[in-house]
Amino acid sequence: MQSFEQKGYLWLLSLTAAWILLIISYPLLMHGGFYRIGVFVYTFFSPICHQDPHRSLSLFQFVLPVCERCSSIYFSFFILLLVYPLLHKLSILKNLKLATLVLFLLPMICDYVFDVLGFWKNFPASRMISGSIAGIGLALFIIPAWNQVFIEIFHLSNISPITKRN
Amino acid sequence: MDDYVLQQKPSKLVPVLIGGAVMAATSVIPVLNMINCLCCAGIMGGAVLAVYFYKKNFPPDLPFSVGDGTIAGLFSGLVGAVLTAIIQAMMIGVSTHGLPPEFDEGFDNAIRQMESSGQDPQIIYQMRDFITQVATSPFLLFLLILVFSLFIFAAFGTLGGVIGGNIFKTRVVKTPPPSHQIGSSS
């Protein structure tokens, strides 16, 4: 059972690392002169982020293709994923409840909604901190569930769901 | 003699179509598509909705697992991607402007960054020319939107499916195994 969980973890780690690399690749590609690929990488992220250059982190004079909030979500998700093997014995990581996930998402939602309503003016640190908290919450909720999927797929795939007829 | 039957899982078709339609709607309707700026909430929400409807169709005696939710989320993501690409292609067909707004903005931002970072104007001109070529070729544009959408919707649809599966999964209460007494008669 343990090896299926490890397999699931490694798959998620690889996919998340690829996603992070894709984000970082844009400034590196543009800096290296690979403009055509770079522009496509930037455009790839356009349906999922507003990509406001004033609200994005930059590297080598080129902004990342996702904003500060999105970057914080993805990077904190990835960092938590990296340290997960060291932390997974903690009881909070066993099975995060939905209500706890909402608590993790709440700062980000408040930061966004209150800014839109005019009660609060968000700033780079508030966007990054609230995004990081959301990313950590999502990682804590998703990693055990994702590992469970791998246990189900590889361990239980040969067991037919048979129930007894009364 | 005890009679055993193989329990069939219900069809995913309708839940997946509903989830895909919600994803497409939250991606192409202006203003509503701003929801995807919050960690792709529209796409993940569509996947969670697909999982909810899939779970509703499950017989009560058949356990619903995170894996069931993940597969429903993944398929709804694929349906959402195809629907989004078709709708955007139709919108491109009726508009005089080539690219969908978010792609257009993405290209513009990238070009503006090249200009502000002091790139060679000749290279910038070549890039603009290249983008114009893509934007004026309907098939290439449709293919570009479809490929990008398939990646994004499949990834976030799967994550939404994992979240939905974790929310709606059947909770298994662990009970100690019954003790068997060999040789005893009742």
Image (tube, coloured by chain):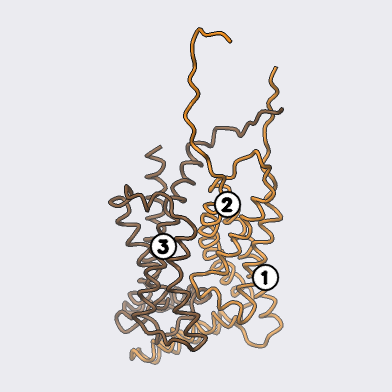
> B132 or B155: which is nearer to us?
B155
Residue B184 image point, x, y percent = 52, 8
Kind of residue indicated by mark 2: Phe
Q: CA distance from mark 3 to mark 1?
A: 34 Å
Tint applied to chain B in the drawing: orange
Label 2 resides on the chain identified as B
Q: Which element carries disc 2, helix, strand or loop?
A: helix
Quickly name the residue at label 1: B86
Q: CA distance from mark 2 to mark 1?
A: 31 Å
> B174 or A154: which is nearer to us?
B174
Quickly name the residue at label 2: B168
- Label 2, residues with CA under 10 Å away: few <14, some 14-19, many ≥20: some
Where, quadrant-wise, is the N terminus of chain B in this rendering?
Answer: top right
Where, quadrant-wise, is the C terminus of chain B in this rendering?
Answer: top right
Report which quarter residue B44 is drawn in. bottom right
Residue A93's disc is none
